[in-house]
Image (cartoon, coloured by chain):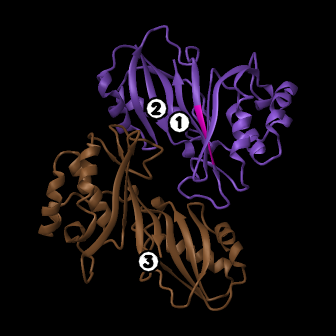
Chain colours: A brown, B purple
Amino acid sequence: MGILLTIAYDGTNYNGWQIQKNGVTVCGALSEALTQVLGGENFSVLGASRTDAGVHALGQRVHLMTEGETRVPLEKLPQVINSALPRDIAVNDAIIVSDSFHPIRDAKSKTYVYKIHNHLHRNPLMWRYSAQVKTPLNLKMMQSACEYFVGEHDFAAFCSTGSSVNSTVRTIYSLSISENDGLMEICINGNGFLYNMVRIIAGTLVEVGGGKIHPNQIPEIMKAKDRTQAGKTMPPQGLTLVEVFY
Amino acid sequence: MGILLTIAYDGTNYNGWQIQKNGVTVCGALSEALTQVLGGENFSVLGASRTDAGVHALGQRVHLMTEGETRVPLEKLPQVINSALPRDIAVNDAIIVSDSFHPIRDAKSKTYVYKIHNHLHRNPLMWRYSAQVKTPLNLKMMQSACEYFVGEHDFAAFCSTGSSVNSTVRTIYSLSISENDGLMEICINGNGFLYNMVRIIAGTLVEVGGGKIHPNQIPEIMKAKDRTQAGKTMPPQGLTLVEVFY
């Protein structure tokens, strides 16, 4: 049977979502917990998003496929899995999905938040969950740059090399920035994201906020499809996968 | 000369503020950094609040006394100390204070926040900074209990044994609770706090929210001066010292 789990994690101590040779991964830790919980049952897991090392999630979705009915009732499943998981990972929800469901293909959009702590001094309670930018950023300029990203565009300039995709065209449905007491939150929703796309858009907005790029230069950068014209890739700890919509 | 530092820390990995025989403490880590920064200079540090193991601070105040003028200019001091501190501690401000200044005696009031994550499932991004309460809490009942704590009262019922104080009378200037997406924040300001007082008040409010204590029972509990009638001492990780006012 197919079950869709909603899971949250603090990515600080993980080498990303995807199981790999080196390092502890979120998928690896979840699989270990599921092995305990499901006893001898065979199962497979597939995440909606391959979050990178250090990236967090509040609403990652994981497609759990089991051979038969699980021995744990569905409504108890999150709690039971949580008791087998380390405290920096938690299952928040479990629902039955149809046999044809696919967690990546069927995702209509995803929301990410990128947090910037814009302060000369670091905030020890936020370093795990935000990137510090010491120079003052102009919020209004950053906000006026947002509109240029919204819509269907070729985001080749906002994609790290090393990814193999058929097309670099994606649609951003919304992009906004708010600020509260020095903590900026960039919230982005789109139908799909290229490798490091959110972190490069965040880095480009930081350049806008620092006066190095003018908002109306964004269309040119997009058109040039040249990675070097966009901002830096911001560090992973500022990024959180908030929600995957089906 | 006397310097008042404002410091923030994530208390997760520290055995509290005060230097002691066992374990790494915030004051110990700060003193090590200051030894590096001030070179051979003699100095002493005294914190405004002796926060317990696991308790956090955004605005702890530390009185730094040096023999002469520090070799680092005052405006550079926070940055220079921060470069010698681990990333879970940071100095945010440094000001000169008079010779007669005393960080504990001269404090007019302190503000603490206690965070409760009221959800069946844990939030991996909040476990360091909040206490999870799984059963649903009635926010309105908790809010209506707050008024009974405000004012000058004998808080003997809300104090852990083991503390030696002349008087258990303290004045609470304000106490409020807000809730956002399952995260409750209890914000309390008062002229002084007994040992574990905020954590016991938080525990009592949790009993109110869970229906075990009625708001109008608070005055009786206060009058009885009986620790066993108040709620449990909530765990340290939910507590943050937000500000000390002079």
How crowded pointer 1 is (Cα within 10 Å; few <14, some 14-19, many 20+) is rated as many
Local SS, label 3: loop
Q: Residue at x 65, y 31 (%)?
A: B175
Q: Are marks 1 and 2 on the same chain?
A: yes
How crowded pointer 2 is (Cα within 10 Å; few <14, some 14-19, many 20+) is rated as many
Position of B204 compared to A46: left or right?
Answer: right
Local SS, label 1: strand
Find out whether the residues at labels 1 and 2 contact each other: C-beta distance under 8 Å: yes
Where does label 3 land, which residue?
A: A107
Residue A10 is a magenta residue: no
Q: Are marks 3 and 2 on the same chain?
A: no
Up/down of A81 relative to B175, above or below: below
Instruction: Look at the image and give the residue range highlighted in magenta.
Output: B112-116
How crowded pointer 3 is (Cα within 10 Å; few <14, some 14-19, many 20+) is rated as some
Front residue (pair A79, B147): B147
Label disc, if present, on residue B57 of the rendered structure: 1
How far separated are the C-alphas under marks 1 and 2? 7 Å
Up/down of B221 relative to A119, above or below: above
Front residue (pair A124, B68): A124
Where does label 2 land, which residue?
A: B7
Residue B38 locus on image (x, y percent): 36, 25
Q: Residue at x 52, y 32 (%)?
A: B27
Q: Disc 3 marks which amino acid?
A: Ala
Residue B113 is a magenta residue: yes
Say which quarter of the image contains residue B18.
top right
Residue A226 in sight: no
Q: Chain of mark 3?
A: A
